[in-house]
Amino acid sequence: MPAMTLNDSKKFFYLKDGKSLRSIAELANSLDKMADDLFAFHVAKDHNHFSNWVRDVFKEEHLADAMKKVHTNSQTGDLLKRYLDKGHFVHEIIIIGGGIAGMSAALYAARGRLDYIIISPDFGGQMNVSGEIENYPGMAHTNFAEFQDKFQEQMKVNEIEFIDEAVKEIKKLEDGHFMVVTDKSKYEGESIVICTGARARKLNIPGEQDYEKKGVTYCHVCDGPLFKGKPVAIVGGGDAALEAAAGMLRIASKLYLITINPQMTGHQYLIERVVGQDSVEIVSNAKTVKIVGEKAATGLVVEQNGKQRTIPVQGIIVEIGRVPNADVVKGLCDIDADGHIMVGKDQQTSVPGIFAAGDCADGHEYQYVISAGQAVTALLKAQRYIKRR
């Protein structure tokens, strides 16, 4: 139990002033009267003696980790009292996802001194597959690498650290809390903010799986340089396809933009940047039916007006949209026909206490600034939800 009293004097916590503590409850009570200089001796940015004691003696790893994130007497006391009241450790908010939505939520949680964790097996989300960025407020022009660097710097300043684990399941508990099960551990939270983003949609045609990473890619930023001086096909007719084409103009010898529509449908500034270039050929009203090759992809078969045509290329970039990463809440939260998590104006899902933001939610507008704004809204609403409980 949290208030368990120790009998072994070797495990007592001895304060600098000589007084001993025998339980977490005694630590919480002593903080109310502890002088600032005494607290500062035991808790600083480079060490936390109280956290170490809780971890080593009581084996409360999650509580110990949470204690390391706070640096004041009152914050530590509030954390311990909440732990004692509940009878075991429960995070206030668990953020799932490491893209721009997850990072935005974590930034507000950190600055609000909430007890939170952010879980994600990777950092950056869609930033890892982006090219040039020219529509984020305050930045006239940047690219994915610079954008990531700025986020990492801001996260370092705010002492935000990821838990490098993959979430497998979310369970609603009888008391209204939530259990997040990862590939390595379990975490209990009063509220959840889902920011799991989306993944590339596949063509699901013959040859696609056979030549994936052998000429077929879903990331022009990652793999585009591999096609230097080679003919490349980009499948898709929207912004993502046009952004990929803009990034490949100086790399590929020839670009074929394959769209099932009569014309490209992205933003006009992207169309103007790509369409009309000497090295670009628009293949419209074309259904992609097959990828062919030998050891690597050598061509793309398309169908136009009932006739098939093989386009000889050595690189194929697929940009036909995204699939929301909503599997962790299927069967728990309402999902729309396209697989997005359904949310209200406050970003709350059909389950009170679970909020969703960014590409996994049903806004259907895949923009960084929208993901960031939705995530901040979700975090603030989750904070209010906790206070109302």
Image (cartoon, helix red, strand yellow):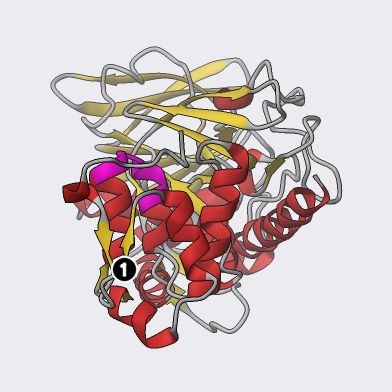
Which of 10/114 is in front?
10
Residue extending farthest bottom: 37
Q: Can residue 38 be seen in this view?
A: yes
Q: Residue at x 78, y 56 (%)?
A: 384
Q: Report the amino acid beneath label 1.
A: Lys
Q: Can residue 123 be seen in this view?
A: no
Residue 252 horizontal/vertical position (percent)? 28, 54
Q: Does the magenta stretch include residue 275?
A: no
Q: Residue at x 29, y 36 (%)?
A: 313
Q: Where are the magenta residues, as a range?
A: 57-64
Q: Does the magenta stretch include residue 58?
A: yes
Residue 309 horizontal/vertical position (percent)? 44, 23
Above or below, 158 against 197 in this view is: below
Q: Which residue is drawn at 42% across and 74% down?
A: 71
Above or below, 333 against 15 in this view is: above
Residue 98 horizontal/vertical position (percent)? 45, 50
**Can you identify the residue that label 1 sits on?**
19
- Describe residue 261's horizontal placement relative to residue 344 as left or right: left
- Main SS, magenta residues: helix
Q: Is mark 1 on a helix, strand or loop?
A: loop
Q: Residues within 10 Å of mark 1 (few under 14, many from 20)?
A: few
Residue extending farthest right: 345
Q: Residue 41 is drawn in which quadrant?
A: bottom left
Q: Which residue is drawn at 67% across and 48% down?
A: 357
Residue 127 horizontal/vertical position (percent)? 43, 57
- Describe residue 131's horizontal placement relative to residue 58 as left or right: right
**Quarter of the picture holding the C terminus:** top right
Above or below, 343 against 27 in this view is: above
Q: Residue 352 is drawn in which quadrant?
A: top right
Q: How many marks?
A: 1
Which of 332/312 is in front?
332
